[in-house]
Image: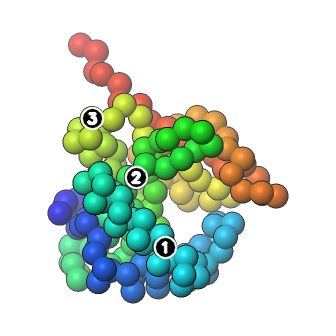
């Protein structure tokens, strides 16, 4: 369990699936997702992948709750290994229930995930994929220190996704 100023980040378990599905099945929470709202079968598969990633790597996407209401999951986010074309990358991702947008939670999560990736996992780079039309998420990534790195043609008949990156650079004395 990890605490930030306003959030509690926990390893997801099967009890979290209903909130995972509710958040990902809501079209408003998926405005920038070319696949749209997630179907039940896809949610089962994706949530299973989240659980497996934790089992294999001992880290992954967290269940996110507010400190003031720790039993209610407001989103999911964190780090996982993801294939970008032919490169395996440490990927930062997040999705919050629309009722919790605009509160700084995505930035707070992203900053903690980056700190975790660099300090606990001792990784050198962290990446994030974002749709070019998702200006709010782009701002979150930029505020968290990521910079535009490249583009990725990952969705047929859609604009390329933007690839953001942050490097773990040593501090020079």
Q: Is residue 146 visible?
A: no
Label 3 with label 2: CB-CB less than 8 Å: no
SS class, disc 1: helix
SS class, disc 3: loop
**Residue picked out by circle 1:** 45
> Alpha-carbon distance for marks 2 and 1?
16 Å
The number of numbered discs placed on residues in the rendered structure image is: 3
Label 1 with label 3: CB-CB less than 8 Å: no
> Which label sits in the foreground, 1 or 3?
1
Q: Is residue 82 visible?
A: yes
SS class, disc 2: strand
Nearest to the observer: residue 122 or residue 168: 122
- Write the residue at 61% across / 56% down: 135
> Which label sits in the foreground, 2 or 1?
1
Percent coordinates x, y for residue 62 in the rendering? 32, 64
Which mark, residue 122? 3
**Residue picked out by circle 2:** 80
Percent coordinates x, y for residue 170 in the rendering? 30, 22
Nearest to the observer: residue 47 or residue 99: 47
Percent coordinates x, y for residue 32 in the rendering? 64, 66
Please identify the quadrant where the C terminus is shown: top left
Other residues around mark 1 within 10 Å, as few (<14) / some (14–19) / many (≥20): few
Percent coordinates x, y for residue 160 in the rendering? 72, 49
Which mark, residue 81? none
Other residues around mark 2 within 10 Å, as few (<14) / some (14–19) / many (≥20): many
Classify 66 as above or below 142. below
Q: Earlier in the sequence, mark 2 or mark 1?
A: 1
- Write the residue at 52% across / 51% down: 139
> Alpha-carbon distance for marks 3 and 2?
14 Å
Nearest to the observer: residue 76 or residue 135: 76
- Write the residue at 28% across / 60% down: 55
Q: Quadrant of residue 172?
A: top left
């Amino acid at each position: 369990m990890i605490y930030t100023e306003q959030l509690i980040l926990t390893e997801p378990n099967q009890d979290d699936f209903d909130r995972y599905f509710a958040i990902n099945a809501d079209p408003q929470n998926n405005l920038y997702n070319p696949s749209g709202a997630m179907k039940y079968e896809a949610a089962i598969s994706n949530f299973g992948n989240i659980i497996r990633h934790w089992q294999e790597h001992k880290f992954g996407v967290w269940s996110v709750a507010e400190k003031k209401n720790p039993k209610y999951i407001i989103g999911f986010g964190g780090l996982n290994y993801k294939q970008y074309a032919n490169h395996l990358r440490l990927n930062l991702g997040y999705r919050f229930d629309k009722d919790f947008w605009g509160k700084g939670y995505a930035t707070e999560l992203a900053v903690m995930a980056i700190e975790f990736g660099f300090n606990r996992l001792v990784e050198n780079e962290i990446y994030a994929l974002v749709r070019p039309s998702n200006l709010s998420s782009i701002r979150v990534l930029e505020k968290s220190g990521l910079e535009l790195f490249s583009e990725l043609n990952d969705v047929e008949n859609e604009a390329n996704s933007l690839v953001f990156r942050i490097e773990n650079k040593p501090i020079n004395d």
